[in-house]
């Protein structure tokens, strides 16, 4: 006769389709309000706030000319490359300082000081040292991604259960093998929280990079639209940044769930 207790069924959770529908309620409500105050009630003029249809037609025009794919493609490329560089460096340095008390005492005060520097303060130096090409944009985005990832990894590893580490060592795990087999799996949730925050920061730093020195990209589209008085294209760029940021975050969320299923 079985004596174990059955696991309680989860209640109150939302399955995939229902969660998508619920998540779409607020964006659709905002879209309806946007249409109401522009087309229906005409509270705002087209110069102040173009209607959703005007923004859609602006996107259609850019799509037909091929410019939309160019702007979106180069921005996504810059974010992915910069994020990969910054997150990779954050994982490595965060792991080093999180695992080594000597390295933490030596380097953490300096890293913490650099973390307090405003993002735009890096721009003049990057333009001076690296130039206005793609390398400078990648570097600026990497800086934005680095600090959230570094902070999360460093803090999480500093608080790993010492008994878990000792158990890993008892099984013969040391160095890199101990890190990848015991310590990093123990901190998957906070590490991915840092990665997702770093990805969001990458999109913010992308706009900063493209606003200052770019001939294409969504940040450039923002500046060009403002200079030309094309508020419809300006709003289009903002909407696209929001959508792309959400898509990339959702993809990283899928990787997080896979990692949790593997290591949890």
Image: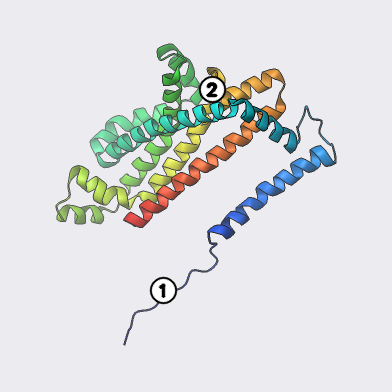
Of discs 1 and 2, which sits in the foreground?
A: 2
Which x, y percent locates residue 47?
Answer: 78, 27
Q: Residues within 10 Å of mark 2 (few under 14, many from 20)?
A: many
Q: Residue furthest right?
A: 41
* Towards the viewer: 153 or 204: 204
User: Which residue is found at the position 55% from the left and 27% from the top?
Assistant: 71
Which x, y percent locates residue 6?
Answer: 40, 77
Residue behind mark 2: 210
User: Which residue is found at the position 33% from the left and 83% from the top?
Assistant: 3
Residue 98, quarter of picture: top left
Q: Is residue 176 visible?
A: yes
Which x, y percent locates residue 234?
Answer: 66, 28
The correct choice, above or below, for 19 with respect to 139 in the image is below
Q: Is residue 87 left or right of residue 205?
A: left
Q: Residue furthest bottom?
A: 1
* Towards the viewer: 246 or 186: 246
The correct choice, above or below, for 172 with respect to 198 in the image is below
Q: Is residue 252 left or right of residue 239?
A: left
User: Which residue is found at the position 53% from the left and 31% from the top?
Assistant: 204
Looking at the figure, which quarter contains the C terminus?
bottom left
Question: Which secondary structure, mark 2?
Answer: helix
Which x, y percent locates residue 105?
Answer: 28, 34
Q: Is residue 194 left or right of residue 245?
A: left
Disc number placed over residue 7 in the picture, else none: 1
Instruction: Give the colour scheme of this rendering.
Output: rainbow
Q: Is residue 116 visible?
A: no
User: Which residue is found at the position 52% from the left and 42% from the top?
Assistant: 247
The correct choice, above or below, for 217 with respect to 43 in the image is above
């Amino acid at each position: 006769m079985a004596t174990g207790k059955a696991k309680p069924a989860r209640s109150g959770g939302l399955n995939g389709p229902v969660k998508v529908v619920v998540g779409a309620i607020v964006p659709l409500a905002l879209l309806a309000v946007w249409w109401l105050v522009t087309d229906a009630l005409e509270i705002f003029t087209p110069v102040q706030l173009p209607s959703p249809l005007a923004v859609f037609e602006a996107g259609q025009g850019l799509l037909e000319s091929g410019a939309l794919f160019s702007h979106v493609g180069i921005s996504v490329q810059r974010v992915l490359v910069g994020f990969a560089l910054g997150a990779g460096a954050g994982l490595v340095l965060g792991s080093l300082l999180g695992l080594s008390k000597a390295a933490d005492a030596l380097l953490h005060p300096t890293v913490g000081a650099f973390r307090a520097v405003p993002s735009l303060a890096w721009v003049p130096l990057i333009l001076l040292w690296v130039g206005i090409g793609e390398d400078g944009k990648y570097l600026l985005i990497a800086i934005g991604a680095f600090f959230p990832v570094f902070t999360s990894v460093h803090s999480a590893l500093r608080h790993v259960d010492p008994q878990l580490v000792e158990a890993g060592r008892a099984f013969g795990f040391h160095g890199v093998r101990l890190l990848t087999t015991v310590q990093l799996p123990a901190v998957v949730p906070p590490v991915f929280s840092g990665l997702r925050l770093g990805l969001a920061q990458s999109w913010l730093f992308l706009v900063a990079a493209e606003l200052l020195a770019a001939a294409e990209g969504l940040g450039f589209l923002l500046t060009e639209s403002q200079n030309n008085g094309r508020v419809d294209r300006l709003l289009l760029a903002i909407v696209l940044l929001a959508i792309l940021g959400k898509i990339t975050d959702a993809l990283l969320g899928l990787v997080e769930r896979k990692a949790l299923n593997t290591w949890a």
